[in-house]
Amino acid sequence: QVQLVESGGGLVQTGGSLRLSCVASGSIFSRNAVGWYRQAPGKQREFVAGITIGGITNYVDSVKGRFTISRDNAKNTVYLQMNSLQPEDSAVYYCNVVHPLIRPDWGQGTQVTVSS
């Protein structure tokens, strides 16, 4: 069973930066588009950024120009560089395969808290 392990979250001030990492057991990331998602308290989980096998990226409008997703297929790892963080970016961040029909169970996520 594929396991996803997110890390790199923490507490930062407004305008700060964090780099999230997500490692998958096995090679599922290297064969699929992968995304970062986030869930704030009382809200549904939302898509934040995605990257295809070939490296094409897309972002939700609210993070464009501030977040950068990247991947290292050899390490089965996906990254999310987050700059100019805002309080509204506070959430638990998760990674997973984009395609819902082959998506493994969600990991525990990593908490990002941005203080104002």
Image (spheres, rainbow, N blue to C red):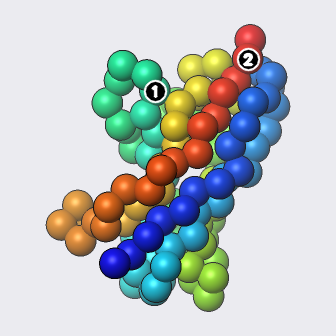
Against 113, residue 65 (above or below) is below
Q: Residues within 10 Å of mark 1 (few under 14, many from 20)?
A: some
Q: Residue at x 32, y 61 (%)?
A: 105
Disc 1 secondary structure class: loop
Identify whether 62 is placed above or below 73: above
The residue under label 2 is 115
x, y (%) of residue 17?
79, 39
* Residue type at tag 2: Ser
Q: Residues within 10 Å of mark 2 (few under 14, many from 20)?
A: some
What's the residue at 48%, 34% (across, down)?
61
Instruction: Identify the mark nearer the N-term, 1 or 2.
Output: 1
**Number of marks in the image?**
2
Q: Amino acid at mark 1?
A: Ala
Relative to 96, is 71 on the left or the right?
A: right
Which is nearer the eye, 86 or 21? 21
Q: Nearer the viewer, residue 57 or 23?
A: 23
Q: Which residue is mark 1?
A: 40
